[in-house]
Amino acid sequence: MNSERVTMTAESLAGLGAGAIAYVRPVRSEEVKTLFPNVPPIAPGLALWALLGADGTPIMLSDSREAVVLNAHENDLETVSLH
């Protein structure tokens, strides 16, 4: 067995899964602006769901996990949940 380690650059790691993987993550409305800078003001205290590309690119925001998962599948993206 080969025990050599392969090192990836931060850029390579960020691009891993690009165009194929999307992350589903719960977010509070107070943190939405950091993920989606162009979003209009949202009332505080809301539980929302974000769909992010493998590199962290914001794709979709919803109040429904099912909606972001459906959007990912409609765009041929495999979803991974982040908690």
Image (spheres, grey):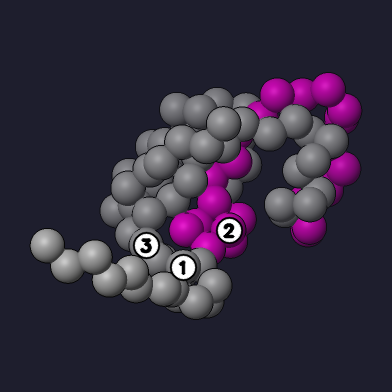
Q: Which residue is mark 2?
A: 56
Q: CA distance from mark 1 to mark 3?
A: 9 Å
Say which amino acid is labelled 3. Answer: Gly
**Which is more foreground, mark 2 or mark 1?**
1
Query: As displayed, is residue 79 above or below residue 5?
Result: above
Tell me where residue 3 sits by quadrant.
bottom left
**Residue at the image position 50 percent from the left and 67 percent from the top:** 14
For marks 2 and 3, the one nearer the N-term is 3
Tag on residue 41?
none
Q: Amino acid at mark 2?
A: Gly
Give me the residue at 59% from left, 41% from top: 50
Q: Secondary structure at mark 1?
A: helix
Mark 2 and mark 1 in contact? Answer it, CB < 8 Å: no
1 or 3: mark nearer the eye? 1
Total marks shown come to: 3
Residue density around tag 3, few if under 14, some if 14–19, many if 20 or more, within 10 Å? some
**Disc 2/disc 1 C-alpha distance (Å):** 11 Å
- Name the spot of residue 6 as percent of width and height, x first: 34, 72
The amino acid sitting under disc 1 is Leu
Against 65, residue 38 (above or below) is below
Of mark 2 and mark 1, the one earlier in the sequence is 1
> Which residue is at a point 44% across and 51% down the rendered structure image?
22
> In the figure, is residue 64 to the left or right of 39?
left
Residue 57 visible: yes
Residue 68 percent coordinates (x, y): 48, 38
> Which residue carries the number 3 mark?
17
Mark seen at residue 13: 1
Camera-side residue: 12 or 32? 12
SS label for mark 3: loop
Residue extent of the magenta highlight: 37-58
Left or right? Give the position of 9 relative to 62: left
